[in-house]
Image (spheres, coloured by chain):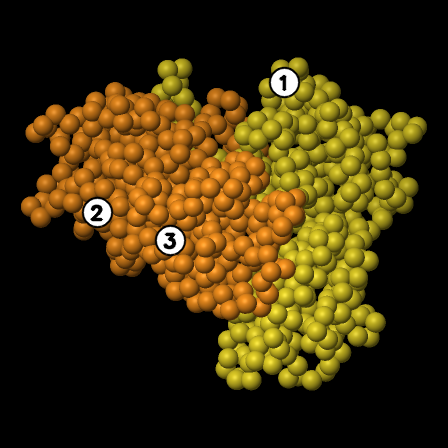
Chain colours: A orange, B yellow
């Protein structure tokens, strides 16, 4: 068991109560008081979450249980923990893992600096794992930092994209109805086979829904249901909402969820999750240049071309000067992509300054950060061979910073006198930058690309 | 309406009756006779397929209907057509598209050389589109090349990974039972909401299945069902198996399908489909070298390193000599990845020979082909600047062959005297080659990478 100090903010997050995800539901924080029930002295930790993570992932067709499969080198469950812990009103997150994965899970918590996590041993079925999680919250053990919550969220370790908005909705509904769960429209029609393997009947699709996660319950309701329920339920049941209905006569409120709630089940879902994560961290590029304020500065020209070529991406620029204060803010705001323009010197001075700042920050803990070191060169004035030495240099830098989860690439942009030709090489440079950011290909780090 | 000459083989496919996909069900062809019912004079075209493709893809969240969304620049529906047309016993494929997409569809058929396709106008609902497809097969019009099949397959335009094995299973079952459809286990529990949005009941997951595609029917059964059914069925129904049950008392056989049958529904499914396709065409690499037979040839050394670094990939090698006869066979066998070793000359002579062969073949029609032009250089003996001229050259080649769907990259591998250092640079080269093949990144074509 371990739990971080209460209220400790994630270093890479903007603040303990903001989700840090673009498009997050900002009405969420406004209703927190009523949800979390934070009257002093009464239920100081009113909402907790239980995450069963004892599955073996047989449907994935890979030996690693799916919750531990890596996405951009980080295990899937860490993304789900990140999604829950950025919601500050969830006071405790209890994760149920099998004994054999206990050490793996501890090292994940340490490496990715997860907070407010407690570990319990998983049971042989999902229901038994959840029950173990609830027991840990129910028992006021002397050495436990956990206390009984008013409301408990139950979520899956393999649904990493859950948003604060839907968590708030199910918690609010659970306070009113005793139980609540997210649902989604059915993608396929559901049929029932008869004993001979033929169609017995098909369900009307519009009248049924897929039951997804998260779900939330008044703690006393779901804990009572688990204490009452039969071994058969614990072994073969799949639906917590059904237990609340059967043993506590609590009719769960069903809440429409977003498509993001889907469960990573098959190998194709891992591919999809990786692409979604890559897309999410590629929405902003910061062009870093020296203090030169001239609007005709080649860095500004590149910025303009990036803006027009990548119209779904936010492109900002920032100077390295002023002790880099603004740049610090951009790093805190979780921009994961930097284009560093080196003009005043022929070596990597600007890039090295940026790399030092990134290494000092905790930005790279959760996601690989892309840095493209851009160099301009008029091939007619400087022999390209001179640049080959730089090439060797960037390979060494790249190897070094890869250890810190920074993917460093070099980009040499031709700088002809002719304005039209310059525009063309800048455009070419923008395409290469976009490709590098989109793919985050660690096999190509340290390469010097030419535009 | 258009239909290719019967039995015409796809140029890029190994033969009209082989699936060309690794792991395809080779027992399939053995049972063809009995399935297709090819007794002379009786039902010469016994199995046809209808593909409703009139949907607007509102769930995808993109303006393009999902069946036309590009994957590796080719529309999704073309992959589904490819999956059906490689099954030689499917004689006709009728696609229902909306009037506004008719020209788009015709150009897709032409560009990707699809055969045995007929187009009909889609209806406003899926059922009406299928009905239109069936009508086209039922009516023996004077100018139509279509004739009534014994069995008709109904499939979705957005399920591109259907295998011959499952098609054969549903067709065989349909001949016996009158109707058959693929099913899959439910991923989520299915619930029914009451009028107030609360849980009414949840279904036992083990006793229900998701109804997927393909489905197959005796033509007379499903055509009769569509002729009998109500407007309400045509507007709001979702399940063809249900129509056969309701109007023809035909109880469909339910056949377990593979996870591959899933329907591309959301944007994440497009991501998943792209990754799966990339993975499938990255299973084989051919190392192409000159006629030098020496086993110590640096090409063979690279081949060995590729084999040990990429253990899930089949690595072969082939000489460009002998008028390239063996290489022709590898191209016919659909290898989509080539590493071309240039040693005897300092320019791109070998690579150019390979590119010419590829351009003459039809290999690149369906998938982008990766060619890595590899060059070796002892930096101590040759000044790197000399190689910069080559760099400029490969950019022009790359631009040119991109038009033919070939992604060309350069790779300069350091060739030191020291054996251990050579192994290290070959290993580095293998990592870069693996990255290029895995990503198929068109933004980086023409780059000269350094190992």
Q: Is residue B160 visible?
A: no
Nearest the camera: B332 or B36?
B332
Q: Secondary structure at mark 1?
A: helix
Nearest the camera: B282 or A159?
B282
Which residue appears at 26% of the width and 30% of the height?
A217
Give the residue number, with chain letter if any, for mark 3.
A354
Q: Where is residue A104, by image quadrant?
A: bottom left
Residue B281 screen position, x and y as percent: 64, 56
Tag 2 or tag 3, which sits nearer the N-term? Answer: 2
Q: Nearer the viewer, mark 3 or mark 2?
A: 3
Considering the image in quadrants, where does the N terminus of chain B appear? top right
Q: Nearer the viewer, mark 2 or mark 1?
A: 2
Gap between marks 3 and 1 measured at Cα: 60 Å
Q: Is residue B104 visible?
A: yes
Question: Would you say A328 lies left or right of A413 here?
Answer: left
Using the image, name the chain to which the residue with label 3 belongs.
Answer: A
> Of all residues shown, which one is farthest toward the right?
B142
Question: Would you say B215 lies left or right of A293 here?
Answer: right
Q: Secondary structure at mark 2?
A: strand
Using the image, name the chain to which the residue with label 2 belongs.
Answer: A
Give the residue number, with chain letter if any, for mark 1.
B235
């Amino acid at each position: 068991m371990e739990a971080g100090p209460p209220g400790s903010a994630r270093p890479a997050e903007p603040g303990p109560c903001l989700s840090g995800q673009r498009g997050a539901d900002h009405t969420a924080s406004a209703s927190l008081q009523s949800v979390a029930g934070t009257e002093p002295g009464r239920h100081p930790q009113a909402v907790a979450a239980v995450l069963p993570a004892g599955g073996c992932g047989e449907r994935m067709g890979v030996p690693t249980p799916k919750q531990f499969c890596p996405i951009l080198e980080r295990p899937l469950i860490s993304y789900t923990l990140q999604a829950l812990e950025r919601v500050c009103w969830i006071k405790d997150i209890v994760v149920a893992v099998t004994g054999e994965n206990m050490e793996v899970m501890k090292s994940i918590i340490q490496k990715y600096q997860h907070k407010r996590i407690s570990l319990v041993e998983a049971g042989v079925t999902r229901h038994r794992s959840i029950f173990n999680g609830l027991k840990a919250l129910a028992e006021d053990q002397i050495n436990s930092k956990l206390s009984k919550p008013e409301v408990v969220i139950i979520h899956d370790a393999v649904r990493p994209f859950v948003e604060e908005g839907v968590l708030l909705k199910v918690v609010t509904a659970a306070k009113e109805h005793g139980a609540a769960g997210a649902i989604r429209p059915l993608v396929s029609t559901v049929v029932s086979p008869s004993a001979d393997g033929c169609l017995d009947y098909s369900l009307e699709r519009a009248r049924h829904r897929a039951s997804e996660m998260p779900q939330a319950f008044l703690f006393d309701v779901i804990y009572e249901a688990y204490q009452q329920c039969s071994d058969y339920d614990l072994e073969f049941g799949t639906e917590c909402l059904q237990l609340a209905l059967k043993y506590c006569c609590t009719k769960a409120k069903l809440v429409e969820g977003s498509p993001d709630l889907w469960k990573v089940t098959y190998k194709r879902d891992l591919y999809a999750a990786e692409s979604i994560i890559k897309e999410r961290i590629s929405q902003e590029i910061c062009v870093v240049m020296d203090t030169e304020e001239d609007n005709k500065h080649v860095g500004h020209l590149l910025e303009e071309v990036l803006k027009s070529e990548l119209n779904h991406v936010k492109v900002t620029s920032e100077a390295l000067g002023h002790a880099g204060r603004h740049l610090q803010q951009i790093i805190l705001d979780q921009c994961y992509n930097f284009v560093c323009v080196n003009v005043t010197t022929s070596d990597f001075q600007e890039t090295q300054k940026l790399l030092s700042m990134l290494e000092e920050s905790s930005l790279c803990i959760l996601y690989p950060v892309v840095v493209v070191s851009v160099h301009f060169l008029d091939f007619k004035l400087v022999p390209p061979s001179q640049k080959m030495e730089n090439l060797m240099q960037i390979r060494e830098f790249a190897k070094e910073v890869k250890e810190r989860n920074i993917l460093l690439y070099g980009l040499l942009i031709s700088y002809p006198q002719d304005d039209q030709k310059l525009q063309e090489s800048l455009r070419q440079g923008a395409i290469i930058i976009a490709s590098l950011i989109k793919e985050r290909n660690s096999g190509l780090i340290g390469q010097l690309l030419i535009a």
